[in-house]
Amino acid sequence: MEKEIKIKDKTYFFVEVPFDAHSFREKLIMDGAGLYVSYEPRIEPYSALQSVKISKDNKENYKIISTTKDITKKQAENIVEECCCSINDRVVYGFIDYWKKINNYQAGAYFLAKESLKSLIQANELDIEKNYLILLKN
């Protein structure tokens, strides 16, 4: 599954990958069927790299950010938006709760960017229990 998500002034692609996927290749592969990214572990008995299709579009510049399983606090902070809102008559600074925002609930905030990222994934109808490769479209 692949999902394009626009946030701030950037476009990200969330592409489902296996939980054991690692060592993603920065160079993307283009063939007649689409754009692919290769990763470890290799497929036995041929020791070929595995790959996942990320787009049917023409090859563009993409930057691999991380997988949702391995994302760091700093990487998540660079994706999600900061906010401040009033909760119980207190001003709270944090990161947007995208699920509440999209579903027109009272504004909410998370103290942790990784939690905000989970809400972004959920708000875009992706399964938060799965692992996604996050790519930034340049």
Image: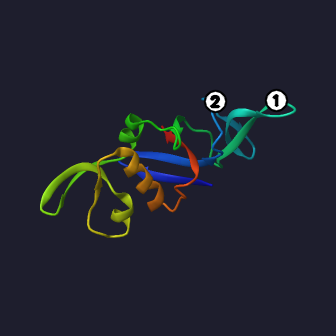
Q: Which mark is residue 47?
A: 1
Labelled pair 2, 1 in contact (Cβ < 8 Å): no
Of marks 2 and 1, which one's residue comes earlier in the chain? Answer: 2
Say which residue appears at 68% left-offset and 46% top-offset. 53
Say which residue appears at 40% left-offset and 41% top-offset. 76
Give the total number of marks visible in the rendering: 2
Say which residue appears at 15% left-offset and 54% top-offset. 91
Q: Nearer the viewer, residue 6 or 105?
A: 105
Q: Nearer the viewer, residue 86 or 26?
A: 86
- Percent coordinates x, y for residue 126 in the rendering: 53, 58
Q: Residue type at mark 2: give it.
A: Arg
The quadrant of the rendering that contains the N terminus is: bottom right
Reading the image, the residue beneath label 2 is 25
Q: CA distance from mark 2 to mark 1?
A: 15 Å
- Percent coordinates x, y for residue 116 in the rendering: 37, 51
Is residue 11 left or right of 94 when viewed as pictured?
A: right
Which callout, 2 or 1, points to the residue nearer the camera?
1
- Percent coordinates x, y for residue 80 in the rendering: 36, 46
Q: Residue furthest bottom?
A: 104
Tell me the element at label 1.
Answer: loop
Q: Residue type at mark 1: give it.
A: Ser
Is residue 1 left or right of 123 when viewed as pictured?
A: right
Is residue 62 left or right of 44 when viewed as pictured?
A: left
**Label 1, residues with CA under 10 Å away: few <14, some 14-19, many ≥20:** few
Is residue 63 left or right of 23 when viewed as pictured?
A: left
- Percent coordinates x, y for residue 103 in the rendering: 37, 69
Tell me the element at label 2.
Answer: loop
Say which residue appears at 12% left-offset and 62% top-offset. 89
